[in-house]
Amino acid sequence: MKFLPDQVVVRLQTEMQTPDLSGTRYRALELLGHGGMGTVWLAQDSILQRPVALKVLAAENSSVDLAARLMQEAVVLARLEHPGIVPVHDAGTLADGRTFYCMKLVEGQTLDHYVRKLPLRERLRLFQRIAEPLAFAHSRGIIHRDLKPANVMVGPFGEVLIMDWGLAKIMAVAGASSATDQVSQHVTDATGLSSIASQVSEHESTRTDQAEHATAHGTILGTPGYMSPEQERGEVNLIDQRTDIFAMGSILQSLLQEPPGSPESEAYSRPLRAICAKAMSAEMSARYPSVQELAADVRRYLDGLPVSAYRENIFERTARLVSRNRVAVVLVLAYLFMRLLFILFSRR
Amino acid sequence: MAPNPQGDAFPLTRHSVVAAAQGRDPEERSRAMDAITNSYWRPVYKYVRLRWHLEREDAEDFTQDFFSRLLEKDFLASYDPAKGKLRTFLRTCIDRLFMNQLRDAHRQKRGEAAVHISLDFEEAEHELAASTQNGSAEDYFEKEWVRTLFALAVERLRVQCHAAGKTTQFAVFERYDLGDEDSRPSYAALAEQFHIAITDVTNYLAFTRREFRRCVLAQLRDMTGSDEEYQREARSLLGVEAK
């Protein structure tokens, strides 16, 4: 028996962890990162000759439940066709038994890295763009449940993509079951994965019937710091789009933080803080009812209009009006000053 | 009784090798014990050298004694796969045997076992010197277990490739995946060395790695106490969903 040095053992172990892509059109190129459920690999699609990203269930997580959850993530992504949501191309089970799905390779930076040097108003505009795909998902009855800066990618041209829908909750909406059935059937037809498709189908039909089955009541899912109180308490049945609005409030709050050494700025303005506070209210009923309304408040702030989350006093209103109509105010002041000079000189 | 160096004699059934070793069929039992001895003697020898600081000869005697008792005294009869891993059970047996021998002052009787197993301690001693020893003796035992698992799987792969006339495939795998990091050749260099195309190198490596994965799983079955342990190890150690 040949003795294997430590480095060879490590190499072989790493090799074994590499997904077995035999029988697929993909070739693993590089490990891109580790997610909550699995690993993401850079792979080459040998037929279409393009790089793609493969999300493969981590070996230690290869339980039936998690395999079904990863497949559900693929199904959710397939249902959400929007420029702000990464498109999924394929899904199935690899020769080594691991569940995977293939998606577009997203190049860019996570939100927290991207915004570091951006001025506040640019950050707020970026925030509005995050709201768009999220509003679209909500309109399709899907709650992300794990929104955070690390799950938002900003591409080289400033395009925003919401990633990692692994914890997404599918709400009961009209037509959801039939859509699920269609997707499941498609997966079965394309890959012969009847067992997985049926798992997904079972999960989803149960979710549709009972609001949430796969995530039992009392289960805590999410990321500390971005989790809503109802998530922290494990009140799965209460979760709806306002749960994501809480997380959006947390993201907005993180966007307001100026880099160390920056002069104090409008990031500390009361309206913005009020928007955060409203979005992050402990009481779900006190939050914005929809992500569109949250985004609209941010837009009003950017446009120099009063925001719904904050009742300003007379001084603040005056200051805002002056700030918004700076040119007009300067012209009026200039006119008044000239008029004053004219009166003074005409008296002499 | 000499353990099979290839480690491939044990039939690849869905039944645990331990169940076979505990069974009534003497032939199957003997082959199962061979498989266990072949898989575990190195980690056992190295473990007692480190854990109990035994001198080389004492460690050799102890290892012989341990596996003899495993054969003769039906140690495995008391193993319950539901309670833990086979290797943890064996490690506990080693520690108990050592403590008993110490207590009974029968250490001088080591080496008097009726059954002598042919084990290459010289090689194990070289391996011990070559491997790094960080952490506890228990961690080291685990690490040696993984090393033995892979080494035996490589042997399986070698035998399999030679039998199938795929010696070049194995040679490419050996050069690329089993060589030193510093002297790891490029695909182009391998293609030139074996007079094959670079795409062949890619294909050969894909083939041998896929087969190696199967060999590891086959070997893992021989080294685990139950289907559950086998499944668990396959998932956590190798990253695959074993079938």
Image (cartoon, coloured by chain):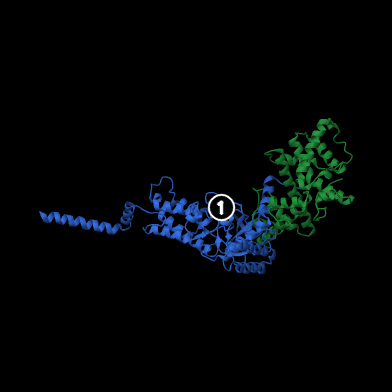
Q: Is residue A173 left or right of residue B127?
A: left
Find residue B237 and report its horizontal and vertical position in percent: 69, 50
Find residue A291 and report its horizontal and vertical position in percent: 48, 60
Q: The green chain is which one?
A: B
Q: Nearer the viewer, residue A153 or A142?
A: A142
Q: Residue at x 72, y 38 (%)?
A: B137
Q: Which of A30 and B218 is in front in this view?
A: B218
| Amino acid found under the numbered disc labelled 1 | Gln
Q: In this view, does A133 lie to the left or right of B156?
A: left
Q: Which of B199 and A185 is in front in this view?
A: A185
Let me know if residue B146 appears in the view: yes
Q: Colour of chain A?
A: blue
Q: Which residue is drawn at 32% across and 55% down?
A: A323
Find residue B163 and report its horizontal and vertical position in percent: 80, 58
Q: Is residue A38 left or right of residue B83?
A: left
Instruction: Kindly identify which residue carries mark 1.
Output: A231
